[in-house]
Amino acid sequence: MDKKLVIPGEFLSDDVKLADEGTYVEDSKVFSSVFGIASLKNHIKVVPLSGKYIPRQGDLIIGIISEVSFSNWIVDIRSPYEGLLHISEFPRRIDNSEMSKYLKVGDSIMTLVKDVDQSMKVELTLNDQRLRQIKDGRIIEVTPSKVPRLIGRSGSMIAMLKNETNCNIFIGQNGRVWLTGKDKNLDIAVRTIQKIEKESHIPGLTDRIVNFLKEEKGIPVKQPIKKKAKKEEAKEHEQEPAEETTRAAKETEETVMEDAEEPENIEEN
């Protein structure tokens, strides 16, 4: 089995070369450092089932302005650590006195983690064509550890979700998701994302999501007949002819008995 549920401190392997995220090495052995799903194929990685987002350089995330200081916007990035957006990382030159005119408390931004130092000072930037202030659509939150499952292998899950809902969807590494589209489509997309988050650890997720999207759009979904039901159905068909034969034989026996009990008509001479 390539995947299994593990707890912190659980032994995973004797091969320290395979150790990856969510693990630690002690006495030349690999152990899990978190409660989560361990992937044991090719390398050993444990994806936590819960927990806060830990920022890394290069992450694309969605932040919310929580404070405006003299030269920095303080940004909530769903992490134990705050993000700092310096005025020099804004895409145009502005004065310190004008900072709140461009980004105020409560505004949402699509931003990039520019740097994270050893003291976990998280520097952000908006100096990239992909980055911007978010002014429309909806923002929802999922557990950061579920982001890879929401994206899917090679982006397969999110590509299907975009195509089936006709929504534009951006997934931040910190678990915030920005969606734009028609309200009806957004409702379906949000419910689907919530289902993916809830059932991401259960095998067969893609097939369930395909069927869920069909149901949400009113398309009939064929339910496979369970093997047990098929066997019981076949057994019933086998019993029916026997029951009919028994019933017919019983009726014949009763008729014969009735004929035998009827008195014979004897003509008197």
Image: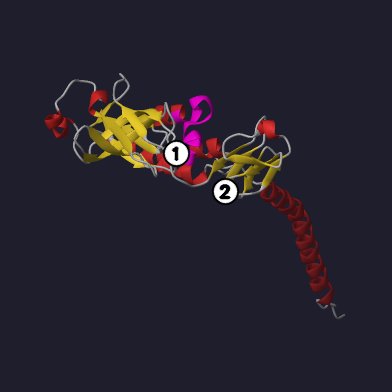
User: Label 2: few (<14), some or many (≥20) within 10 Å?
Assistant: some
**Mark sitting on residue 35:** 2
Instruction: Tell whether position 150 is magenta.
Output: yes
Which residue position is annotated with label 1? 54
| Image point (37%, 34%), residue name | 122
The mark lying in front, picked from 2 and 1, is: 1
In the rendered structure, which segment of residues is drawn in magenta? Answer: 145-158
**Sequence order check: which comes first, mark 2 or mark 1?**
2
Query: Which one is in front, 260 or 74?
Result: 74
Q: Kindly check if marks 2 and 1 are in contact, taking CB atoms under 8 A apart as contact.
A: no
Q: Amino acid at mark 1?
A: Ile
Q: Position of residue 247 (x, y in %)?
A: 76, 62
Query: Which one is in front, 266 or 116?
Result: 116
Residue most extreme to the right: 269
Q: Amino acid at mark 2?
A: Phe
Instruction: Tell whether position 199 is magenta.
Output: no
Say which quarter of the image contains residue 25: top right
Q: Position of residue 57 (x, y in %)?
A: 42, 28
